[in-house]
Image (cartoon, rainbow, N blue to C red):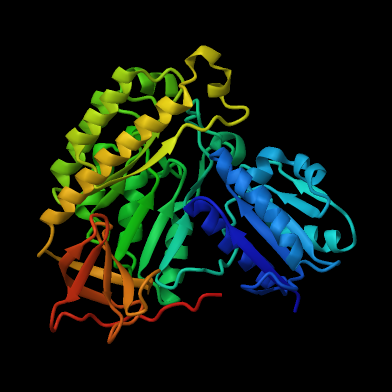
Amino acid sequence: MPRVYLETYGCQMNVADSELMLGKLAAAGYEHTENPDGADVILVNTCAVRENAEQRVIGRLTDLRRHMTRDTVLGVTGCMAQRLGARLLDADSRVSLVVGPDAYRALPDLIESARKGERATATDFDLEEHYDDFQARRFEGVKAWIPVQRGCDYRCTYCIVPYTRGPERSRALADVVRETREVVAAGLSEVVLLGQTVNSWTDGTGDFGDLLRAVGAVDGIRRVRFTSPHPNDFSDRVIAAMAETPAVCEHVHLPMQSGSTSMLKRMIRRYTREGYLACVERMRAAIPALSITTDIIVGFPGETGAEFDDTLSAVREIGFDDAFTFKFSAREGTPATRMPAELTVPDDVVDTRYEELVRVVRGISRERNMRRLGERREVLVEKAARKGGDLLQARSRDFRTVMVPAEGTAIGEYLEVELTGTTGSTFTGTPVPTSRAVRLPTLAVN
């Protein structure tokens, strides 16, 4: 069997797409290998959200040459492939394939053509493509990423996603439920529903609240998560479904991007500071134990000191459990690149603001986590810890990372633990006697 090696960069949607690609190639007779040495096909599934992500891929493409034989097919897939198209073929003579997110169905044929010496790009959008008939080869041993929506219609001024993923379209509820049942049959009990603005999902007959209830009702599902939602699409119906569906976890990742109404307007986020705060208040009223994380951009064109202070005050007022913080990265083709040059925030100012934001976010997170010591959480053991062979990494329903003893514990097991220590961001947990849940079977990593 020809062997295919695949590297994935970027968001969870890219991880899910990689699983779909491997599933399609497996059905076509390819074997997945975790080592690029001597692989017949090397694919790099890419991200285009920030410039440094693309530069990292360019460097990796050069590095991968040392693993290639004369006949190895090297392909670039994903958002960077969609954005740059044939320019990638021109930039690197060893790249044979450039395949966008809507063209994975043609991947086996494109590879066969490349093995005969034909170089090709496939970057047309297909507004009907959801890969419903693909059998994903899942990387995760304890959870399943399930795309329910592709593309985005919001078109924020800084964001490249609408140009690399196309317009928003949603899968049918029945197809999502069918895949969820297949996930349970394969031995998994947690699913993560994916979409660029996932809570705007609709199949024409139901809304995202209906989808949450339907997926949460599948026999064998213990945890339902979703990412990433948009603050505008949390209707009362959706929030009620979150609160009333036992399987839906008490965590939401709610991108804020800025705490300043004037900044949000320049970003075309379509909500105000007050609207975002009201959304948080409605969710916390319905789900008091809700954990909230967010995304925040520093240094967007025109950001003033007062606007940055508005962001800091919003962070303090909301008390996020954590935040992914980013320095603004201009992406070719987005409206933000056409803003007047005088709006550019100097690099040293961006650096200073970024450090201050990180300090505030980490301080709040540490303070909140210290108060949780002594509490009990149900955790799902996910994988070996990065450091320390005597620990496994687990995750609570409210998205806390908890390190648990490896001895006597297995990946895929549910435990009740007492939170006994914290680094400020992660916890250590001690299993509570007699609380050990029945371990569920897990998927082997392919």
Q: Quadrant of residue 273?
A: top left
Evaluate whether residue 7 shows in this view.
yes
Q: Nearer the viewer, residue 122 or 207?
A: 122
Say which residue appears at 64% left-offset and 44% top-offset. Answer: 80
Q: Is residue 323 left or right of residue 204?
A: left
Placement of the C terminus among the 4 image quadrants: bottom right
Q: Quadrant of residue 280?
A: top left
In the rendered image, residue 341, in percent from the top left (x then y), is placed at 55, 15
Q: Nearer the viewer, residue 211 or 106?
A: 106
In the rendered image, residue 285, in percent from the top left (x then y), is placed at 13, 41
Q: Is residue 420 left or right of residue 242?
A: left
Say which residue appears at 35% left-offset and 17% top-offset. Answer: 262
Q: Is residue 381 above or below residue 199?
A: below
In the rendered image, residue 100, in percent from the top left (x then y), is placed at 67, 47
Q: Is residue 429 left or right of residue 69?
A: left
Counting the numbered discs, the total is 0
Q: Nearer the viewer, residue 228 or 220?
A: 228
Say which residue appears at 61% left-offset and 42% top-offset. Answer: 127
Q: Is residue 357 above or below residue 34?
A: above
Q: Quadrant of residue 315?
A: top left
Say which residue appears at 31% left-offset and 23% top-offset. Answer: 260
Placement of the N terminus among the 4 image quadrants: bottom right
Evaluate whether residue 299 shows in this view.
no
Residue farthest bottom in this picture: 408
In the rendered image, residue 252, in percent from the top left (x then y), is placed at 29, 48
